[in-house]
Amino acid sequence: MTISSSIIQLPDTGSGGPAQPLTVEGRVVHGDERGRTLGFPTANLALDRLGIADGVWAGVASWTTADGVPHSRAAAISVGRRPTYYGGTGIRLLEAFLLDFTGDLYDKQLVVSLQQRIRPQRRFANSDELVQQLQGDVAATRAWAAQNHRHPGDVRRGRFGPVNRKKPSPADYAHMQERRRVNRENRVRDAVAVLAPNEVTHDRIAELSGIPLNYLRWAYSDSLALLAVGCDAGAPS
Ligand SMILES: Cc1cc2nc3c(=O)[nH]c(=O)nc-3n(C[C@H](O)[C@H](O)[C@H](O)COP(=O)(O)O)c2cc1C
């Protein structure tokens, strides 16, 4: 495994959330693929030589796709040796569980900023206890993100609607709608890909993709329609 990560900002050691977040950049490497089984797949950066304390944070993971489009997601981030499985002898990894994301980031260059420390690393008695804690970490991250993180391109909303929003032309509007549709379709396809065919339901896809259940029920009449998206090999990814 190549050690390709680097710290690009130093941590503020004050209490609470750091004024200047610790930021790590690196190429996403393979872990043990256990995260998927636990229901928390992570994008992993190798950290062996970097002096970051172990712990769990809420923060943001950002990357750019081949077409130059920037993306970011709020993430629950773990720095440590996975003591539940390896005691003190595991390799040190930064693992980011991206909220509302189901794609593949292997080999992508990822920038991860650690913004709000949640807790220290712990050794759990078993996977069930770890998963229970991860659910709590994700809830804490979601609460942090609701206050602090927006996706690029999000419209900032004031009390009376969008702020500083120019009215799009009909052509722009149609383009935006199409991009949204394609984005949702990709998220459905990603979600279908991690499920067995008999597990594909509107509820499971909504849970995995973050797409509202009402939209899924409106756009896809039944499980067969959802499965058909997963089989559409020619569609853009
Ligand atoms: C938010 C978050 C917090 C974590 N906290 C711990 C922890 O306290 N103790 C631990 O042993 N592993 C912790 N992990 C790491 C998991 O053990 C690891 O993601 C899981 O075993 C999957 O590893 P893999 O990517 O190598 O398959 C955490 C992971 C995440 C995403």
Image (cartoon, helix red, strand yellow):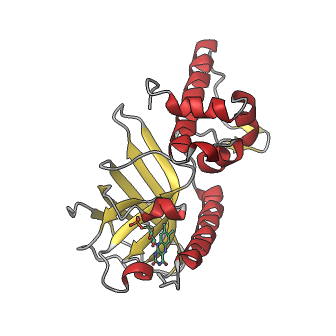
User: Which residue is situated farthest in the top direction here?
Assistant: 171
User: Where, quadrant-wise, is the N terminus in this rendering?
Assistant: bottom left
Determine the image quadrant of residue 42.
Answer: bottom left
On the question of residue 210 being in view, the answer is: no
- The picture places residue 172, in percent across and down from the top left corner, at 58, 18
Q: Is residue 157 left or right of residue 183?
A: right
Question: How many marks are shown on the rendered structure?
Answer: 0
Comparing 33 with 11, the one in front is 33
Determine the image quadrant of residue 80.
Answer: bottom left
Placement of 74 over or under 183, stated as above or below:
below
On the question of residue 58 being in view, the answer is: yes
Q: Which residue is painted at 57% across and 70% down in the image?
A: 134
Q: Is residue 207 left or right of residue 62?
A: right
User: Where, quadrant-wise, is the C terminus in this rendering?
Assistant: top left
Placement of 216 over or under 101, stated as above or below:
above
Q: Is residue 14 left or right of residue 30?
A: right
User: Which residue is situated farthest in the right direction here?
Assistant: 160
- The picture places residue 7, in percent across and down from the top left corner, at 30, 65
Q: Which residue is painted at 46% across and 45% down in the image?
A: 103
Q: Which residue is painted at 64% across and 29% down in the image?
A: 225
Comparing 7 with 196, the one in front is 196
- The picture places residue 47, in percent across and down from the top left corner, at 29, 69
Placement of 224 over or under 23, stated as above or below:
above
Determine the image quadrant of residue 167.
Answer: top right
User: Which residue is situated farthest in the left direction here?
Assistant: 2
Q: Is residue 218 left or right of residue 69?
A: right
- The picture places residue 40, in percent across and down from the top left corner, at 52, 61
Comparing 72 with 15, the one in front is 72
Comparing 203 with 13, the one in front is 203
